[in-house]
Image (cartoon, rainbow, N blue to C red):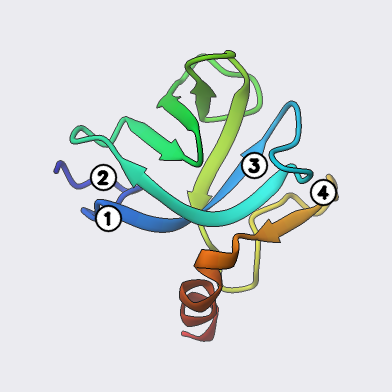
């Protein structure tokens, strides 16, 4: 796998995923496990295939099925990456709670 700033050379990583359109399972922001394609340009989260883009207005990825924009980034130690001026609901996926705690306790 090609090592990028996003995947850090890992096949699977806990990341912050924010929908810039419709919520995912009731929330716009999620902290959860994502997997990466070999090139690192495609991210898989839940049932979504998200490809890297430089053409978006609000996101850095888009859903290949719907065209909806997403912001994906590493989890910050202070919590989610949601912009303070844009308060949104952020949930931590149940299977990512332990790893999330490790990240923010560093």
The earlier-in-sequence mark between 4 and 2 is 2
Q: Are marks 1 and 3 in contact (CB under 8 Å)?
A: no
13 relative position to 95: left or right:
left
Q: Give the residue pinned by disc 3.
A: 18
Of tags 1 and 3, the one toward the viewer is 3
- Give coordinates of residue 50: x percent, y percent: 46, 28
Q: Residue at x 65, y 68 (%)?
A: 79
- Give coordinates of residue 29: x percent, y percent: 69, 48
Quadrant of the rendering where the N terminus is positioned: top left
Q: Nearer the viewer, residue 18 or 81?
A: 18
Q: Nearer the viewer, residue 78 or 100?
A: 100
Q: Calculate the distance from the C-alpha at mark 4 to the C-alpha at mark 2.
A: 28 Å
The earlier-in-sequence mark between 1 and 3 is 1
Q: Are marks 3 and 4 in contact (CB under 8 Å)?
A: yes
Q: Give the residue pinned by disc 1.
A: 8
Q: Are marks 4 and 1 in contact (CB under 8 Å)?
A: no
The earlier-in-sequence mark between 4 and 1 is 1
- Give coordinates of residue 82: x percent, y percent: 71, 51
Q: Give the residue pinned by disc 2.
A: 4
Circle 3 SS class: strand
Q: Calculate the distance from the C-alpha at mark 3 to the C-alpha at mark 4.
A: 9 Å
């Amino acid at each position: 796998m090609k090592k990028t700033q996003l995947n850090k050379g890992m096949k699977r990583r806990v990341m912050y995923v924010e929908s810039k359109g419709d919520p995912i399972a009731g929330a716009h922001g999620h902290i959860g496990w994502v997997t990466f394609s070999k090139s690192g340009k495609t991210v898989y989260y839940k049932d979504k295939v998200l490809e890297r883009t430089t053409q978006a207005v609000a996101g850095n990825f888009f859903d290949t099925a719907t065209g909806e924009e997403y912001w994906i980034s590493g989890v910050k130690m202070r919590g989610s990456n949601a912009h303070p001026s844009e308060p949104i609901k952020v949930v931590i996926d149940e299977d990512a709670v332990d790893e999330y705690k490790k990240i923010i306790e560093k």
